[in-house]
Amino acid sequence: MGVVVVAAGSGTRLGAERPKAFVELSGMTLLEHALRGVVATAGVDEVIVVVPADLVAGAEAVAAPMTGPTGPTLQVVPGGAERTDSVAAGLAALSGAVRIVLVHDAARCLTPVVVFERVLEALDGGAAGAVPGVPVVDTIKVIDGEGLVTGTPSRDSLRAVQTPQGFRREVLEQAHACAVAATDDAALVEALGHPVLVVEGDHRSLKITTPEDLERAERLLRLTAG
Ligand SMILES: Nc1ccn([C@@H]2O[C@H](COP(=O)(O)OP(=O)(O)OP(=O)(O)O)[C@@H](O)[C@H]2O)c(=O)n1
Ligand SMILES: C[C@](O)(CO)[C@H](O)COP(=O)(O)O
């Protein structure tokens, strides 16, 4: 099984001095936190880390010691302009032996191992794709271009989805080959008509997007340590 960790975003909304995955949280970069969860997951054979082109060497120095002598192989490759380009770059770097792929955001750096396990379990059960999701707590409105509400979908059928998102490799490759604009990999797979299962996500798997998210993650880490 292979894991593609996408860490090539710039982090515009975070507004830090360096790309988001290289920002520190409790003394460790987001990328290192994310990799801790990845390498602690049983069954990972290959890890591909996708970073901005000028940070490949730096990321290698940080990430390589994290896998240990008996751990998965690790490669660092340059990403692209959009998240889908970075995922595609990671996919292309996997060896031919990999049949199952998990795609994980470095920005979801505190994802617990149990979430990786739930996604893998769903794939073991035969799903073509599986993604973690949490129930939506707000009421969601659909609006038109003027801001007028055109609908209020039932919350019971809504889930906010996270990563890691897991797929059979051939399905994900096929989806990326006919890539349309999408904000996650599951949407590309769904567009081809493949079933994608939502498994239970976790509030600790928040995506660090804004400075407030970074503070929330610091608080979560303090709670876990204490
Ligand atoms: N060209 C890109 C864009 C995003 N990502 C990765 O995709 C994940 C989710 O993206 P997001 O949180 O939106 O990160 P950024 O694009 O960096 O954030 P922003 O939109 O604020 O610039 C992150 O781990 C990010 O590093 C990536 O690898 N390559
Ligand atoms: C893949 C993702 O994390 C699932 O919630 C999300 O869609 C990434 O979106 P972003 O706009 O690239 O942050």
Image: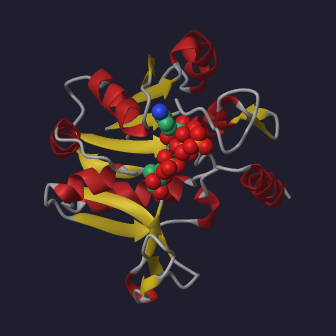
- Residue at 60%, 53% in the rendered image: 207
Decide if residue 173 is on the left or right side of residue 209: left
Which of the two residues, 55 or 15, is positioned nearer the viewer here?
15
- Residue at 61%, 58% in the rendered image: 206
Q: Quadrant of the C terminus?
A: bottom right
- Determine whether 214 is above or below 190 in the image: above
- Determine whether 87 is above or below 148 in the image: above
Measured as percent of width and height from the top left, residue 172 is found at 23, 43
Measured as percent of width and height from the top left, residue 98 is found at 24, 32
* Observer able to see residue 106: no
- Residue at 80%, 51% in the rendered image: 218
Measured as percent of width and height from the top left, residue 65 is found at 60, 19
Q: Quadrant of residue 177?
A: top left
The number of numbered discs placed on residues in the rendered structure image is 0
Q: Quadrant of residue 60?
A: top right
Measured as percent of width and height from the top left, residue 161 is found at 45, 63
Which of the two residues, 200 or 68, is positioned nearer the viewer here?
200
Which of the two residues, 14 or 144, is positioned nearer the viewer here?
144
- Determine whether 16 is above or below 68 in the image: below
